[in-house]
Image (cartoon, helix red, strand yellow):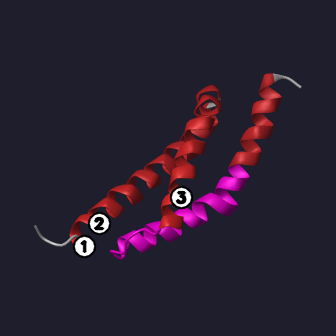
Amino acid sequence: MTGNEKDLGVGIALLERLTTQTLPRAFEIKKKVDRGEQLIEWDIDFLQKLLERAEEIKPLVDRNPEYQGVYAQAVHLYKEITERALLNEKESAPPG
């Protein structure tokens, strides 16, 4: 198996997981923080794993420009969630 074939197989598997598992959960969390709710530990663990996976697959994305769009969207979604979650935390903190 060549490097390109291996990248293709890995890419297909990652994209399938992204579309069937990761993005649906991320969008649930996004809706939650958009409503002003705070993240629970399970949400934070999920987002941490999402960031770790993004770092792991970055070399694959760099070698395969066709994955860059979906990769960028997932990273942007992560950024939106974490920024809103931080704002929610600040807004719910007691004054002082």
Density class for disc 2 (Cα within 10 Å; few <14, some 14-19, many ≥20) is some
Residue 37 within the magenta-colored segment of the rendering: yes
Disc 1 + disc 3, Cβ < 8 Å: no
Real-space CA distance between mark 1 and mark 2, rounded to the nearest whole angstrom = 5 Å
Q: CA distance from mark 3 to mark 2?
A: 17 Å
* Residue at 48 percent of width and 47 percent of height: 75
Query: Where does label 3 land, which residue?
Result: 45
Q: Main secondary structure of the magenta part?
A: helix
- Residue at 55% across, 37% down: 55
Q: Is residue 45 magenta?
A: no
What residue is pinned by disc 1? 92
Task: Work out whether 68 lies above or below 24.
Answer: above
Q: Nearer the viewer, residue 17 or 53?
A: 53
SS for tag 2? helix
Crowding around mark 3 (Cα neighbors within 10 Å: few <14, some 14 to 19, many 20+) is: few
Front residue of this view, candidates 81 and 15: 81
Q: Earlier in the sequence, mark 1 or mark 3?
A: 3
Region of the chain picked out in magenta, as a range: 15-40
Q: Which circle marks residue 89 in the picture?
A: 2
CB atoms of marks 3 and 2 within 8 Å: no
Question: Where does residue 68 sit, x and y in percent of width and height?
Answer: 56, 38
Q: Nearer the viewer, residue 26 or 73?
A: 26
Quadrant in which residue 21 is drawn: bottom right
The amino acid pointed to by label 1 is: Ser
Q: Is residue 24 left or right of residue 47?
A: right
Q: Which quadrant holds residue 32?
A: bottom left
Determine contact: label 1, label 2, CB under 8 Å.
yes
User: Could you tell which of marks 3 and 2 lies nearer the N-terminus?
Assistant: 3
Quadrant assignment, res 83: bottom left
Q: What amino acid does circle 2 point to?
A: Glu
